Image (cartoon, rainbow, N blue to C red):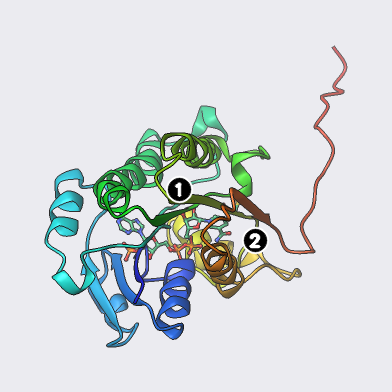
Amino acid sequence: MTTVFVTGASSGFGAAIARRFAAAGARVVACARRADRLAALGSDVLPLVLDVRDRAAVAAAIEALPPSHADIDILVNNAGLARGLEPAHRADLDDWERMLDTNCRGLIYCTHAVLPGMVARGRGHVVNIGSTAATYPYPGGNVYGATKAFVRQFSLNLRSDLHGTGVRVTCIEPGMVGGTEFSVVRFGGDAERAAQVYAGMEPLTADDVAEAVYWSVAQPPHVNVNTIELMPVAQSFAPFQVDRRPR
Ligand code: NDP
Ligand code: 8X3
């Protein structure tokens, strides 16, 4: 039976990914900070209360997994967040640090703890949740987009390091996804402002992302899906901004 470790599983994509794998018969370890939300995933899932920003706690928690769940086959590094949408010159430095600590440091702590076991077993799959924000800048995206560019480049570099080990790496890069807490968190709990982000358009859903994760993992062992970028049909590209003010 496959063992899957999903970070950020108390909400949004992580909860959908945990449910998707549990429904397919996998053993799932679901990690996040909110225990009550993890418990709601049901008894098929092993809840793990963990703040991925805590380097020592991450190493200790993975070391202390029960033998039934200790050999992680699939690590889904999903825990992450955006804070603020201010231009860089007005942004809150605490917000920037929190994004770096969660989206970059948390992801490398989990990866570092899990990889040696995968390599020793000669199989495994690390799936990192990036974002279209890694590739396409937008006003106010500043550090959030930069953290997701880190996620993409780290994923590609992992592939180089893991060459010949049998361990696969995939980066999933969604555009706008509704129905999660992402925008509420970004706007500091302002649910009304968060709802405006998705007003009048049909975003992707957490289940769409979970399906992309599941599909990438379900490919035969000789296939490595490097990157999947997906967007809602209602989202596409705009031209560059040009400053035409008279000088
Ligand atoms: P949610 O806010 O709904 O979920 C985020 C999850 O991360 C929660 O379960 C939260 O749990 C967990 N989390 C946050 N901080 C920590 C931490 N320090 N330690 C452990 N868990 C943590 O957002 P989404 O599901 O929308 O986002 C999931 C991922 O997808 C993020 O990495 C996000 O950047 C990315 N993404 C989101 C998109 C979107 O449009 N929604 C598009 C592209 C990428 P808890 O608070 O209980 O710890
Ligand atoms: C989340 C998508 O466009 O809000 O990664 O940055 S976006």
Residue positioned 42% across, 36% down in the render: 92
- How many marks the image carries: the answer is 2
- Report how far apart the C-alphas of labels 2 and 1 lie in the structure: 14 Å
Query: Who comes first in sequence, dot 2 or dot 1?
Result: 1
x then y, percent, for residue 141: 58, 40
User: Looking at numbered disc 2 in the image, what kind of residue is underneath it?
Assistant: Val
Q: Please say whether residue 60 is visible from this viewpoint.
A: yes
Which residue is disc 1 drawn over?
83
Residue 81 at x, y = what percent?
Answer: 44, 52
Residue tagged 2: 197
Which quadrant of the figure has residue 208? bottom right
Disc 1 beta carbon < 8 A from ligand 1? no
Instruction: From this view, report whether residue 86 is shown above or below residue 187.
Output: above
The quarter of the picture where the N terminus appears is bottom left
Q: Residue furthest top?
A: 247
- State which quadrant residue 140 falls in: top right
Rendering quarter of residue 77: bottom left
- Report the residue at 73% width, 71% height from top: 202
Label 2 residue SS:
helix
Q: Is residue 187 visible?
A: no
Q: Is residue 61 left or right of residue 163?
A: left
Residue 162 at x, y percent in the picture: 41, 40
Viewer-side residue, 170 vs 2: 2
Q: Amino acid at mark 1?
A: Arg
User: How many neighbours does mark 1 have within 10 angstroms: few (below 14), some (14-19), or many (20 or more)?
Assistant: many
Extreme residue toward the bottom, this view: 43
